[in-house]
Amino acid sequence: DTEVTQTPKHLVMGMTNKKSLKCEQHMGHRAMYWYKQKAKKPPELMFVYSYEKLSINESVPSRFSPECPNSSLLNLHLHALQPEDSALYLCASSRGTGGLLSNQPQHFGDGTRLSIL
Amino acid sequence: GDSVTQMEGPVTLSEEAFLTINCTYTATGYPSLFWYVQYPGEGLQLLLKATKADDKGSNKGFEATYRKETTSFHLEKGSVQVSDSAVYFCALSPDSSYKLIFGSGTRLLVRP
């Protein structure tokens, strides 16, 4: 059983829709991540939150908007997506991102499979 | 920059065969090394890790040893099962960093 829970598992949306992806962890981790994974490729990092603050945005288009309401929750708000945004979106968490907490393994959820019509 | 190179797949084996998936890396300092597994329709699961040279990570019959002299972290299993069919990713976390740098992944198919 995964300790990082993502909802929904599948999402189909039109290019004009607004939707949100949700991620939850209860491991006390203070770093949370969003990744995008295309078929037969490794995950690509999108955003990093450290202690509920956005610390890294890997030049992601503004149609993707992350939010971290508290230390256990991470959202990804979607608006005006393009067909090429269809992918598996993975959330991950780790104990931390710096100092003695760096190099910690990341724990992944099962992802949300997103299809843009 | 830092990078990970994995052998290309797919790797096709019969049940109970010996498995090796090669992984080499380029990094400065002392990265941590990981193997992740992704079963069909699922996210990535941490399979094993090693944080310093000569460390051996092991889990579920899989093993990998952190070899700094050859910059390698090859994944091995003595006897694979059909249920091991999945995509395996080698990854490194650079020294004092949050980043995970993934290899391209190797698909393993185990036939009965």
Image: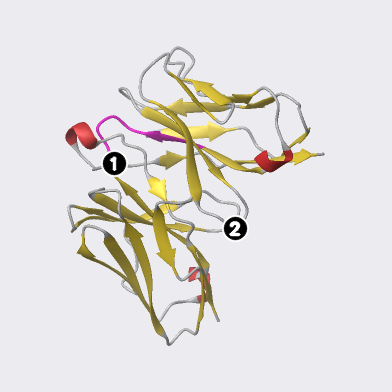
Number of callouts: 2
In the rendered image, residue A74, in percent from the top left (x then y), is placed at 29, 63
- B20 left or right of A71 in image: right
Q: Is residue B17 visible?
A: yes
- A99 left or right of B7 in image: left
Q: What residue is pinned by disc 2?
A: B41
Q: Residue at x 63, y 25 (%)?
A: B77
Q: Nearer the viewer, mark 2 or mark 1?
A: 2
Q: Which mark is residue B98?
A: 1
In the rendered image, residue B7, in percent from the top left (x then y), is placed at 62, 32
Amino acid on which disc 2 is placed: Gly
Q: Which mark is residue A64?
A: none
Does B107 appear above or below B71?
below
Task: Write the start and end of the magenta stretch as one range.
Answer: B90-97
Amino acid on which disc 1 is placed: Tyr
Q: Residue at x 33, y 42 (%)?
A: B99
Question: Dot 2 lies on which element?
Answer: loop
